[in-house]
Amino acid sequence: MKFKLGRKASDIVAALYIITTLFVRLYLEPQLGGRYLLSVALGAFGLLFLWALIKSGFLNPSFFGLWPGEAEEQSQKKRQSLSSQ
């Protein structure tokens, strides 16, 4: 059985994760002594981890209503298939 968060919970988790990783990068950057590539690598790893959570189905974000839900996507597909017939 897959554990899956709802859309609002996924939005909150994703937003908190992005804010936290941004804070960590801004906090660590002065301590890295000019090694900006390491900071970029940390940011890329953070986004890759978030992408993996979304791709695996654990997170199901709607990006605070900006991304259409599954029901809306399915209704659009049905409308398109009906109009093409």
Image: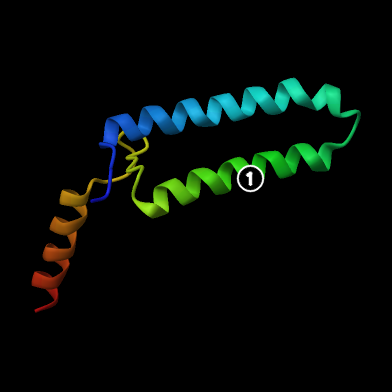
Residue at x-position 16% and y-position 67%:
80
Residue 71 point in image, percent of width and height: 15, 50
Residue at x-position 63% and y-position 45%:
45
Query: Of the residues shown, which amino acid type is indicated by label 1?
Result: Phe
Q: Is residue 67 left or right of residue 39?
A: left
Residue 13 point in image, percent of width and height: 41, 30
Q: Which residue in the structure is indicated by mark 1?
A: 45
Above-or-below relation of 68 to 26? below
Query: Quick one: which residue is furthest to the front in this view?
Result: 1
| Nearer to me, 66 or 54 | 54
Using a 10 Å C-alpha cutoff, classify the residue at mark 1 as few (fewer than 14 neighbours), some (14 to 19) or many (20 or more): few
Q: Secondary structure at mark 1?
A: helix
Residue at x-position 34% and y-position 50%:
57
Residue 64 appearing in the image: no
Q: How is the image coloured?
A: rainbow
Among the 4 quarters of the image, the one containing residue 55: bottom left
